[in-house]
Amino acid sequence: MNNSDTLAFAVLFKEAYLKCFGQALENPLSETESKLFCNQVLEQTGLSIGWKSVKNYSFFIIDGANSKSENPSIATLDTLARYVLRAPYTTEIKRKNDESHYPYWFLYKEQFNRSLKKTAPKKALTVSFVLLSILILLIVPVIFMKYIRTKGTAEFSDDFKYLTGNSLASRGWFVQNKDTAYWNKKDEIPGQLTLFTLRGDNWPDPANKPGIKNLLLRPIPYDCFTAELHLSNFIPKQEWQQAGILLSEDTTLAGKSMRLSIAYNDYFAGTLQPKEIYIQAITSLGDGYGKPEEIAHKPVLYPDSARKNPVLIENLRNSALRIEKHGKIFRFLFAAGIRENSAFKEVVSQEFDMRPKYIGVFAIKGFVDGSANMPVHFTFFRITANDCGR
């Protein structure tokens, strides 16, 4: 590539990264992030890019002269341009037959060159002025995203009305550890996301690797935030069935994590106690750091009592979970009631040194085989930026 193409590629890659992760590219991509990036591009465009190449591109763009020179193929450049420009879904064969001239890369390059000309003075540009213009073009997204994170002006919300793969991907969602049979039932109730309490957990277990099937994730673009999740008629009935919000440092669930969930419990280590539906908050330091810590265990309903007085079950008709992060302080809240506007009440606040990069919506039943795969219906999700100085 010539210098002009290299500059256009660098800006294109940064735009694609910003679209995928919701934040500016500041460091080279890890293997996990590269694979996630490629999966997002594939899901939206129908075209694939090698994750190792993506990782190398990120090093080249971040390190510049200190990194090995990269020369991506025109097909790769076109794929990235299709992703950024939201081109129609296609396949490798269809593109070869209909668009072998790679129109989206040349369209993007034309727009890029036009943007440089618009910002240039009427006289011929000097070399220093060209470099300054390009530097501004590359740095502005970084400054903007840092402003968003620190000032708390950004918000994302989802009412789960549109659940096709392309629609979810366009809104920043991706699915981890997909169980196709159950994932295909995600829209069984129109206007709601349906997940099932499948076998799996992020709780460290000597006999099982951490893993949550059909875990719906999205990047967190803020240092501090408030995340809120609404559920409809979720009343777990068997041991370990639960659903809620997961925060994680990575997509492998090997790093630090925490979760807030509505869960069922009838195990009390041999002591006689009533079965309970409770709010549980757990933090984990990740692989190799021993057992997680249950920082909250708050009963909200006793099923045996509810059988005698069924009106109590109505109190869980509309439930919601909220996690607030201010610096290292995490605040966990819960709301439930017959009406949707029930007030949130604090469950616990805890200091935890963690900067989560991903937030997920999950349903699990732990590493057990006896419990049923219960449907869980989610009606709303929202995440907003907070002021970290609070």
Image (cartoon, helix red, strand yellow):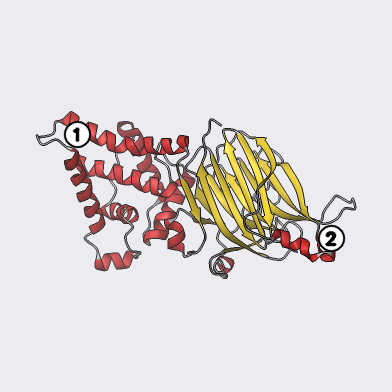
Given residues 14 and 1, the one toward you in this image is 14
Dot 1 falls on a residue whose secondary structure is helix
Which amino acid, by three-letter code, is at mark 1?
A: Val
Name the image quarter holding the C terminus.
top right
Q: CA distance from mark 2 to mark 1?
A: 73 Å
- Residue 28 in the image: state x and y as whole percent: 41, 38
Given residues 67 and 101, the one toward you in this image is 101
Residue 390 in the figure: left or right of residue 151: right
Question: Does 201 appear above or below 152?
Answer: below
Say the numbered circle drawn on residue 305.
2
Say the numbered circle drawn on residue 139.
none
How many numbered circles are shown?
2
Name the image quarter holding the N terminus.
top left
Q: Of callouts 2 and 1, which one flags the residue occurring earlier in the amino acid sequence?
A: 1
Residue at left 67%, top 41%? Answer: 283
Does residue 251 appear anywhere in the picture?
no
Dot 2 falls on a residue whose secondary structure is helix
Question: Does 321 appear above or below 249?
Answer: below
- Residue 20 in the image: state x and y as whole percent: 42, 49
Q: Residues within 10 Å of mark 1 (few under 14, many from 20)?
A: some
Q: Nearer the viewer, mark 2 or mark 1?
A: 2
Which amino acid, by three-letter code, is at mark 2?
A: Ser
Query: Which residue matches tag 1?
Result: 130
- Residue 308 in the image: state x and y as whole percent: 85, 65
Question: Does 175 appear above or below 98?
Answer: above
Residue at left 68%, top 62%? Answer: 317
Does residue 387 appear anywhere in the picture?
yes
- Residue 153 in the image: state x and y as whole percent: 45, 41
Given residues 224 and 151, the one toward you in this image is 151
Given residues 29 and 264, the one toward you in this image is 264
Residue at left 36%, top 35%? Answer: 62
